[in-house]
Amino acid sequence: MSDQHLGTSDLRDPDTDPTAAYALEPGYVRSLTDGVLATTGRTEPTYAPVNGQPLGMVPQSSTGDVAEAFERARRAQRAWARTSLAERSAILLRLHDLVLDRQAEIMDLICWESGKARKHAFDEPLHIALTARYYARTGEEHLATQRVPGLVPGLTRVDVNRVPKGVVGIISPWNYPFTLALCDGIPALMAGNAVVAKPDSQTMLTALLGKRLLEDAGFPRDLWQVVAGPGGEIGTAIVERADYVCFTGSTATGRIIAQKCADRLIGCSLELGGKNPILVLRDADLDRAAEGAVRASFSNAGQLCVSTERMFVADQVYDRFVEKLVARTQAMRLEPGIDWGSDMGSLTSRQQLETVTAHVEDARAQGARVLTGGRARPDLGPFYYEPTILEGVTPEMTCFGTETFGPVVSLYRFGDEADAVARANAGDYGLNASIYTRDTARGRVLAREVKCGTVNINEAFGATFASIASPMGGMRESGLGRRQGAEGIHRYTEAQSVATQRLVRLSPMLGMSDETFAKVMTANLRLLNKLGWK
Ligand code: NAD
């Protein structure tokens, strides 16, 4: 996807159109864009998807600026790595409170830059508060030096240190512009690293508000650098310099980044796309399933990596479930603007609108039925599209297996559960799944058969995504590595083993021959195994 998501025909130019005033105070915008390291003198405008109104101008970085950002971050990291875990935790807990205190401002910017409904924008400060709290309270548990059993009981002491990688590059997309800009960086900072971040060009201001909040909470200014510009140029410059890369975005870009990281022999975690299934079993609470299915499919107008695009519904309950699902979808309020009250917002760009329209028109042309939705709503704003439910989708239709990343879900009937799981597992993705059943134990057994990194039982996606202790990420082409939980912080550390050998050497002593040494060692091995030694 290109970095400027709005087509020029969608924009209102404040120089020629008197009704096109900037939506945000220029002073406020400057207070945020001060946080970008950019010396090119070039700026790019940002625009609100809800109405095409200009928001402000964002300075653009050069690859030289990226190099300078890494210099500054490296200097800051050397001092930061010497701070105590208690000090880092205290700052994270302040961030938690700040994000909750300033949630209205955060949600305003998210809504302006992404076009999402305010109720979906709320998920973002919530997720950052949860992430800050979790890593503040568990940093010690994940990062403290650990004693592990050594070769010779009592005489080989082994300490495992968690050493920060250094400077982490974070490249993030536009769809959850606050949380995805920050959530992966929080454990990186907690583990003693610095960050150089490149948010998507569409949503720079939201990401810069995140940087401002990190500073207000007490993180040193240079510890978190932000650069701006096209992914191919500025993102690449980050991958060429970072000690570790955390990327969230499309599978196509993730593949390019993985190749570059492989060349440099550095690690990366990749949070990529999905074509996520819901399974509604015959014993499901259908009202609950329909409520969850609406949220799973239409949160942020379906522009959510873990949102549902395929629903497999048991034959016995199919008709009743579909009736409830369609009724709930038709009752959704679509309202323009950024205030509370709308159940679904705008798509974020013309490109998104074109993809969604193309997928639905292709399905319709090849015989799929549109149960509800299926059309753009220019009366609400340039990129609004109705929540859409399709039936009769077949493998030759684009939306059967390709991620739409929009408010479009396809319904499929199933007779037996093994078949439903096999169809849910078809394709290359494996990010998130949901299972609705009253028999939750049975649901957990079935979950093990589903090839997805997260499975929610009787919930859309929030139960895993907002439980920060649970690792989150994709199997197969949905990603590499995990955010959240222990994995989410250990990825930013090198495990360093320090073994201290006391009294005996690990070689023959006191004139012992090699052969006798081997016999003594063999006898020891047998004894330790009998004693259950690890
Ligand atoms: P994208 O891959 O086009 O862009 C994401 C980021 O990568 C942007 O900041 C962009 O500037 C940058 N970028 C682009 N090309 C680059 C390159 N060659 N080198 C370095 N950086 C580059 O993704 P998108 O289309 O904007 O985002 C939507 C996709 O992201 C969807 O597929 C969605 O499923 C996925 N996503 C995944 C998660 C997750 O957690 N798994 C979360 C959100 C979105």
Image (spheres, rainbow, N blue to C red):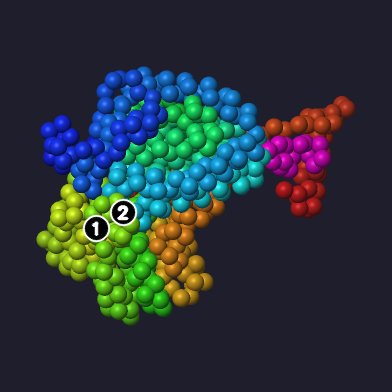
Of residues 372 and 270, which is closer to you in this image? 372
Rendered location of residue 22, percent (x, y): 24, 37
Residue at x 41%, y 59% (from the top left corner): 461
Rendered location of residue 440, percent (x, y): 49, 72
For badge 2, the amino acid type reads Asp
Q: From the viewer's perspective, tell me whether residue 268 is left or right of residue 365.
A: right
Examine the structure image and report whether residue 178 is included in the region drawn in magenta.
Answer: no
Q: From the viewer's perspective, tell me whether residue 118 is left or right of residue 528.
A: left
Tell me if residue 39 can be seen: yes
| SS label for mark 1 | loop
Q: Is mark 2 within 8 Å of ligand 1?
A: no
First to last magenta residue range: 145-160
Examine the structure image and report whether residue 152 is included in the region drawn in magenta.
Answer: yes
Of residues 205 and 306, which is closer to you in this image? 205
Of residues 135 and 57, which is closer to you in this image? 57
Q: Is mark 1 within 8 Å of ligand 1?
A: no
Rendered location of residue 345, percent (x, y): 27, 54
Q: Quadrant of the N terminus?
A: top left
Rendered location of residue 374, percent (x, y): 17, 61
Tell me if residue 262 can be seen: no
Q: Are marks 2 and 1 in contact (CB under 8 Å)?
A: yes
**Which mark, by number, is residue 335?**
1
Q: Nearer the viewer, mark 2 or mark 1?
A: 2
Please determine whether, in this image, residue 480 is positioned above or below residue 71.
Answer: below
Please determine whether, in this image, residue 113 is positioned above or below residue 509.
Answer: below
Q: From the viewer's perspective, tell me whether residue 272 is left or right of residue 151.
A: left
Return the residue at label 2.
339
Label 1 Cα neighbours within 10 Å, binned few <14 / some 14-19 / many ≥20: some
Q: From the viewer's perspective, tell me whether residue 57 is left or right of residue 439.
A: left
Quadrant of residue 515 in the image? top right
Residue at x 50%, y 35% (from the top left corner): 216
For badge 1, the amino acid type reads Glu
